[in-house]
Image (cartoon, coloured by chain):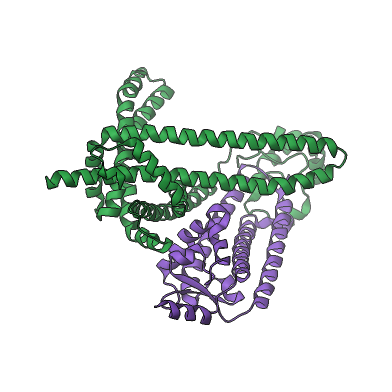
Amino acid sequence: MILYDLDMYSTFANVNASLRLAWKHKKLWVFALLVAGGLSFNSGSSNSNGNKDSSSDTPRETPQQQNIDLYDLEQNAEKKVLGTSTGMMAPIDETRTNSIQNRVAPADVLTAPRPPVIPVAQIVIIVADLLVLMLFGIFVNLFVNAWATGSFIKGLGLAIDDKAYTFRDLAVVGRQKVASLVKFSLFTSLLSLLAVLPLVGVGIWTAVSAIKNSPSFSPAPILVTSLAYVPLMALFIIAVHYITIFAIRHIVFKEMGVKEAFSAGWGTFKENLGRALKLTFANCLVQAVIGLALLISLGLIIGILAAVAFGVGTVLKEATALLVILGILVGTPLLIAVLLALSALAGFSQTYNGFTWSHLFNYSEYERSTRTAK
Amino acid sequence: MNEVQEQQNNLNTNYASFFKRLMASVLDSTFSFCVFVGMLLAGMALAFPNVMYRHRYDLDLTSMATVLAVFFTSLLLATVVNLIHTLVILPKFGGTLGKLLYGANVLNSNTDSFLDTKTAFWRQFAGYQFSAQFFGLGFLSMLKDPQKLTWHDHMFDTKVVNAKGNLFVGLLATLLFWGLLGFLIYQLVLTGTSTFNF
């Protein structure tokens, strides 16, 4: 490969070669897309129309009570109120009095305010259900993403070496590497979480102190922490990102375990810090150009369509039904075409990105092997 | 296997058509929806039992929370049923409900045996996602494939062949399930409107 015959690594040559390979190996776009893709307040009492109280949705009533009337007066509160308001009159025709009462004023005005009923059981069930569904989704996504990553990285390597491959060949490798890649993914996620935890802890402590209006409250700790710790945390997370790029290639190509791959990835990153940063900048530039080209193309298409639609609308201004049908007939395939193009662009972009890092990784390994040989 | 033997094998194997596989998927989806809506109805009946006494509930916090609890529990149970459908029925009987009713079996390409659970998991979860990219291009690719294999069939060494059962039975089952789904949705709407005071 041209990159490895050179005495010096060239970011420009890397970008060139990667763009050509990404365009040539369209099969990898699908894997790239998968890799990128990858969680009785109680109303108080009855209403004026006499409907059921919300607190009575527990099965307390018997059918007989239901049949008496549709009004719903809470046994304790409403009857006491009835007694107060109609105490001068006896005997009380309860049915008539209640219907009068409901016409005169809603019962909730006459009853004492009740504390809101928080449906704890329901909330627990909702949270438990959501948790299980989320965990299932995360589990499946983790495995599918790891499989796609392993297949994709292997595909990049075979493409760089100009070797033939099929979907099956890549899928087999992906399945073989799933366990290691899942463990690695969990390991790096844990590292990132641990990095963020101190900041979260200080934030919570500051918020609690502020709420309690504690005399000892001071924004100084959070400010100091933010100024000193956040840059370090950001650097750590960025470093983990770069280590991951190289470590997963160590896992796929060198059959390394998780810790070994992490350590090797750190070594590769250290040796290629300058090249990695240059490549990141170059990739950002390339993505920006691709994005700009896409925006201009989309803008042109939308502009042309708008002009055509305006012209057609002017001619057919009376026939709105025809306009709608035309709009759907023309618009739908166009929308599908645009979405397909966007997917293809995303796949191409991710594949290009993958090739650049695989090229850098290969060059680094080549450099190390020649250094060792000497 | 050499090329001549492979060609002979292709001629001998009766691969399931695109239409059959598509309708089988439609039937599977309809079945899944029926399970979900059925559980939702059952949940609503259990959570709001006084509806049978023509009692209406106020649409307050408790009722709304109860409805949400019923919804998410039904979703979870339906997911479990679908998981069993995919990871137990498919490996054990050689196909999902839809495929079996339409007369198709999913087999290992190399051994002509039913799939094991791991392959079934990868084919359904990873394989379907893969084939679904670019508006289902992986599924449509079987139209040009001589063995009528999709991308996920190629990846996981599977093939879908004709088996017992036929298109007519499958179509009848699809219509029945559509009818059932329509009925369940109608009952659900009816239950909703008669349960609460809006």
> Is residue A61 rendered to the left or right of residue A291?
right
Number of marks drawn: 0
Q: What quarter of the picture does the N terminus of chain B occupy?
A: bottom left
Tell me which residue sits at (67%, 68%) in the image.
B177
Q: Closest to the observer: B91 or B166?
A: B166
Image position of A280 with respect to B192: above or below = above
Q: Residue at x 69, y 74 (%)?
A: B172
The answer to whether residue A7 is above or below residue B192 is: above
Residue at (43, 69) in percent of width and height: B157
- The chain letter of the purple chain reads B
- Is residue B109 shown left or right of residue A298? left
Q: In x, y percent, where is residue B29?
A: 60, 63
Picture quarter containing residue A274?
A: top left
- Image quadrant occupied by the C terminus of chain B: top right
At which x and y percent is residue A217?
Answer: 36, 19
Q: Nearer the viewer, residue A276 or A177?
A: A276
Q: Position of residue B179 (x, y in %)?
A: 71, 66
Q: Position of residue B89 (x, y in %)?
A: 50, 72
Chain A visual colour: green
Residue drawn at point x = 42 percent, y = 45 percent: A20
Which quadrant of the figure has residue B52? bottom right
The reply to whether residue A237 is visible in this rendering is: no
User: Looking at the image, can residue B133 be seen?
Assistant: yes
Q: Is residue A258 left or right of residue B38?
A: left
Q: Is residue A320 left or right of residue A191?
A: right
- In the image, farthest residue toward the left: A374
